[in-house]
Amino acid sequence: MSSTGTAPTTKPGQRAGSVLDCSDLVRRFGSRTAVDGIGLTIRLGETYGLLGPNGAGKTTTIRMVCGLLEPGSGTVRVAGRTMHSAAGAAKRLIGYVPQEIALYPDLTARENLRFFGRLYRLPRRRLDRRVDEVLDLIDLAARADDRVDSLSGGMRRRLNIGAGLVHSPTLLVLDEPTVGVDPQSRHAIMTSVRRFGNEGMAVLYTTHYMEEAERLCDRVGIIDHGRLIAEGTPRELVALVAEKDRVELVAAGDLGRFVEQCRNLPGVEGADVGGEAGGTVHAVVRDARSLLPRLLDLTRTCGVQVRSVQVVEPDLETVFLHLTGTALRE
């Protein structure tokens, strides 16, 4: 298998060893500020996770990174090339995989990859070799000559990633690539992403699933309301709440009222409702063991029926809830 990318020469404005340098990115849509001063750096061989709920500004950020959206202010440099002033050179270094499936359903898997490779003007022999490599990489070699509309949803997701890989990018940008896929396909996608970083490619991975960020990412940036509110390795971020616990109550009833009153209890640092159909209360607390009796008393006062209670070790979701007061998932 060929290398997924070639180490670029350091250029003016590029930090040593970095592939992506963003500084002070701002983007507004009318009166709404979608991205508010975000800056981040990704190095060669690093998988960087941009973690946050839907609507936090993740997709707007990566569209600016890829040159699909002009920043209101701030700069994006890819391997030292400024995106707005040298867009062609910068874009050729990026493989962008959007949330939506961007494939031609009446073409085969191989034909789709060849089409995208030709857009990058890959020579024919190199293109044929690279298409075979990518099909192996995404585990679709056996379905190479099947039409896309005959593939499962998970296979289409993997082929969507393959289309972003065919030109051997230096930076791969993945926008929530596991949304709507079955567990087996999700595992296959995550295994592939881990391999990309191990082979030296820089990866920007957006998600609102904290377990994906914990498993895949060397560093994580937590984004909320368009701002980067914390950044570091998963272990560094979890250390921010090392002395705190996360309590999960699966319950029914007036959970909104219960959460409001939870937030007023001494020792509760954040509480919100999440989970399937909004039936789980997440709370970050100090000393869960001593606080649980008061929480359960409060459920009775609020007429809430508790089905289960669990104290969870601190994780990235605990960090997000601690920093913002709301649950990570939406």
Image (cartoon, grey):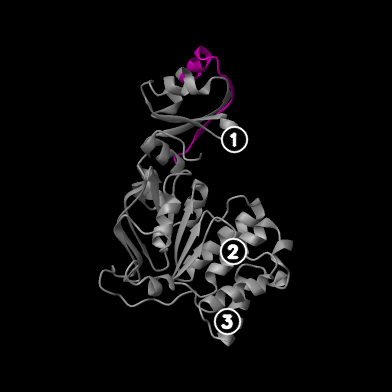
Q: Toward which corner of the image does residue 310 lie, by quadrant?
A: top right
Query: Which marked residue is nearer to the observer: mark 2 or mark 1?
Result: 2
Q: What residue sits right under mark 2 in the picture? A: 160
Q: CA distance from mark 2 to mark 3?
A: 17 Å
The amino acid type, in three-letter code, at marker 1 is Glu
Q: Secondary structure at mark 1?
A: helix
The amino acid type, in three-letter code, at marker 3 is Leu
The answer to whether marks 2 and 3 mark residues whose Cβ atoms lie closer than 8 Å is no
Vertical relation: 126 (above or below) 268: below
- Label whose residue precedes the other's in the sequence (2 or 1): 2
Q: What residue sits right under mark 1 in the picture? A: 276
Residue 94 % position (x, y) = 45, 69
Is residue 240 at least partly visible in the picture?
Answer: yes
Q: Residue at x 50, y 59 (%)?
A: 174
The answer to whether marks 1 and 3 mark residues whose Cβ atoms lie closer than 8 Å is no
Residue 128 % position (x, y) = 61, 82
- Label whose residue precedes the other's in the sequence (2 or 3): 3
How packed mark 2 is, by other alpha carbons closer than 10 Å (few <14, some 14-19, many 20 or more), is many
Q: Secondary structure at mark 2?
A: helix
Residue 273 % position (x, y) = 50, 30
- Label whose residue precedes the other's in the sequence (1 or 3): 3
Magenta range: 295-314
Q: CA distance from mark 1 to mark 3?
A: 45 Å
Using the image, tell me which numbered label, if any, was put on residue 127: 3
The amino acid type, in three-letter code, at marker 2 is Asn
Q: Residue at x 66, y 51 (%)?
A: 182
Q: Residue at x 45, y 44 (%)?
A: 55
Residue 330 falls left or right of residue 319: right
Vertical relation: 191 (above or below) 36: below
Residues 46 and 312: in front is 46
Q: Secondary structure at mark 3?
A: helix
